[in-house]
Amino acid sequence: MDVTTVFIVVGGIVVGIGASFSGLGGGFLMVPLLLSLGFSAQKAVGTSFLGILVISISALVAHNKFANVDYKYGILLGLGGIIGAQIGARLLEHVSTENFKKIFAVILIGLAVYVFVKK
């Protein structure tokens, strides 16, 4: 195994812990990781979704064991997410990697401020 492969696997472990613990999905960690490895914004986002799919299935199984899953609302969120995902993927095709990094940073900062000041 080369260093990049080890880095990706260790990154996946960290993302899996963070996603399962916080419910943030993992993309907030995985996308910057992939960007730092030289992926384009489009490939980083697409690749992170594959990783998130695998992590999400595992996290769902773990949370289900503790009866922490509301299937009705989870499915409804997923159905809305299907539409949003199609729109988002098409929008991303028109954004450069450099502009994506700026937009992504603003979103992360905005979420951080919201979580920090929310009572």
Image (cartoon, rainbow, N blue to C red):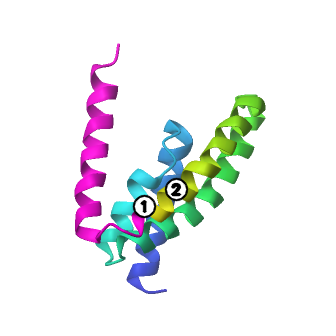
**Residue at coordinates 72% horizontally, 31% vertically from top-left?**
69
Work out whether 42 lies above or below 61.
below
**Residue at coordinates 39% horizontally, 62% vertically from top-left?**
31
Q: Indicate which disc residue 87 carries.
A: 2
Q: Is 27 contained in the magenta span?
A: no
Q: Is 111 contained in the magenta span?
A: yes
Residue 58: x and y, percent?
68, 52
Work out whether 108 lies above or below 97.
above
Residue 89: x and y, percent?
49, 62
- Tell me the SS state at disc 2: helix
Residue numbers of the magenta segment: 92-119
Left or right: 39 with respect to 51? left
Q: Which amino acid does label 1 sit on?
A: Leu
| For the residues bearing labels 2 and 1, Cβ distance under 8 angstroms | yes
Left or right: 100 with respect to 67? left
Residue 36: x and y, percent?
29, 71
Left or right: 45 with respect to 112? right
Residue 39: x and y, percent?
36, 77
Task: Report the front residue among 61 and 106.
Answer: 106
Q: Which amino acid does label 2 sit on?
A: Ile
**Alpha carbon distance from label 2 to label 1:** 6 Å
For the C terminus, the quadrant is top left
Category of crowding for the residue at label 1, using alpha-carbon neighbours closer than 10 angstroms: few (below 14), some (14–19), many (at least 20): few
- Tell me the SS state at disc 1: helix
Q: Quadrant of residue 114?
A: top left
User: Which residue sits furthest top?
Assistant: 119
Category of crowding for the residue at label 2, using alpha-carbon neighbours closer than 10 angstroms: few (below 14), some (14–19), many (at least 20): few
Q: Quadrant of residue 73?
A: top right
Q: Main secondary structure of the magenta part?
A: helix
Disc 1 marks which residue?
91
Work out whether 112 lies above or below 108.
above
**Residue at coordinates 67% horizontally, 43% vertically from top-left?**
78
